[in-house]
Amino acid sequence: MSEGDHSCKLALVTGSTSGIGLGVARELAGSGYRIMLHGLLDAGAGADLAADFTREFAVDCGFSNADLSTLRGCTELVVATQEFGGSVDVLVNNAGIQYTSAAVDFPQARWDSLIAVNLNAPFYLSQQVLPAMLAVGWGRIINIASVHGLVASNKKAAYCAAKHGLVGLTKVLALESAKAGVTVNAICPGWVETPLIEPQIQAIAQAQGIDIERAKMALVGEKQPLPVATQPAAIGQLVVFLLSDAAATMTGIALPVDGGWTAQ
Ligand SMILES: NC(=O)c1ccc[n+]([C@@H]2O[C@H](COP(=O)([O-])OP(=O)(O)OC[C@H]3O[C@@H](n4cnc5c(N)ncnc54)[C@H](O)[C@@H]3O)[C@@H](O)[C@H]2O)c1
């Protein structure tokens, strides 16, 4: 397939009803990809979002609200995607959740659900879409990992375990797909301005008695030498690049977008 002609390519972006996934889906739709939107919205709101995308970007869009915390939900999403638009050319494993607690107190149910959504689901989904990519000799899998796939922070045992696991999975899938025109890469953002980080901002505001803007600056600046949160659209533009012919030999990487967080 030639660069620039994406009219026949189908991209499944998990967790694309919010935050980074929505930013990625918007950039891909703007680049001509057909999009399978996905996330925990009710079916009506999801259908409205898909219709908005079609109006704004003139591309076909589907929607599924499959719960990715189980293998069954992952399979449901792949089947819904295939029914909508055939086999998946691009899979962006983005859906994710956060929970913070010291490891010794970490509730086991929280550990299980975080590992299920942030690590098991990318594995199950990749396993189900890869055979068709390998058969046609083109495909792209992008895993939205995190700086926490590269370094640790306090109170993020499950998140760091899942994201380090996702970086490892990225490398193995890249090796196993390398001869078949399929690339697999991870993006490792630092702070990105989305609903996922709101509870952490609110906790700082409350603990320090400061307003939300100052709490955001404190959160971002504590880890990032460049103290600015990345916007979801910037991650989307990076995904578009990783799908392009210019990135055809980039595979198995874990690329930080982190204001210098992991350079320290
Ligand atoms: N925001 C950040 O600073 C940041 C930094 C690094 C990595 N990330 C990663 O980026 C990804 C997206 O994060 P975000 O900040 O955009 O989050 P968000 O909370 O804005 O969006 C999460 C998306 O995942 C979906 N989702 C959550 N649980 C699900 C489940 N059980 N089944 C199906 N879908 C589910 C939600 O519906 C939503 O669409 C996550 O994997 C996160 O770990 C975020």
Image: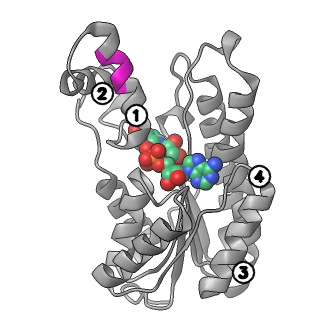
Which element carries disc 1, helix, strand or loop?
Answer: helix
Q: Which residue is mark 3?
A: 132
Question: Left or right: where does residue 137 sit relative to residue 224?
Answer: right
Distance from mark 1 CB to nearest ligand 1 atom below 8 Å = yes
Q: Position of residue 173 (x, y in %)?
A: 70, 59
Q: Which residue is mark 4?
A: 70
Q: Which one is in front in this view, the residue at disc 4 or the one at disc 2? A: 4
Q: Which residue is mark 1?
A: 197
Badge 3 amino acid? Ala
Single out the mark in the foreground, 4 or 3.
4
Q: Which residues are the magenta region?
A: 201-205
Instruction: For mark 3, give the secondary structure.
Output: helix
On screen, residue 65 above or below 8: above
Asked if residue 171 can be seen in this view, the reply is no
Q: CA distance from mark 4 to mark 3?
A: 22 Å
Q: Residue at x 36, y 86 (%)?
A: 4
Mark 2: amino acid: Val
Give how far across and how far down residue 136 sits, in percent: 67, 87
Answer with mark 3 or mark 2, whichever residue precedes in sequence.
Answer: 3
Please name the residue that numbered disc 2 is placed on: 220
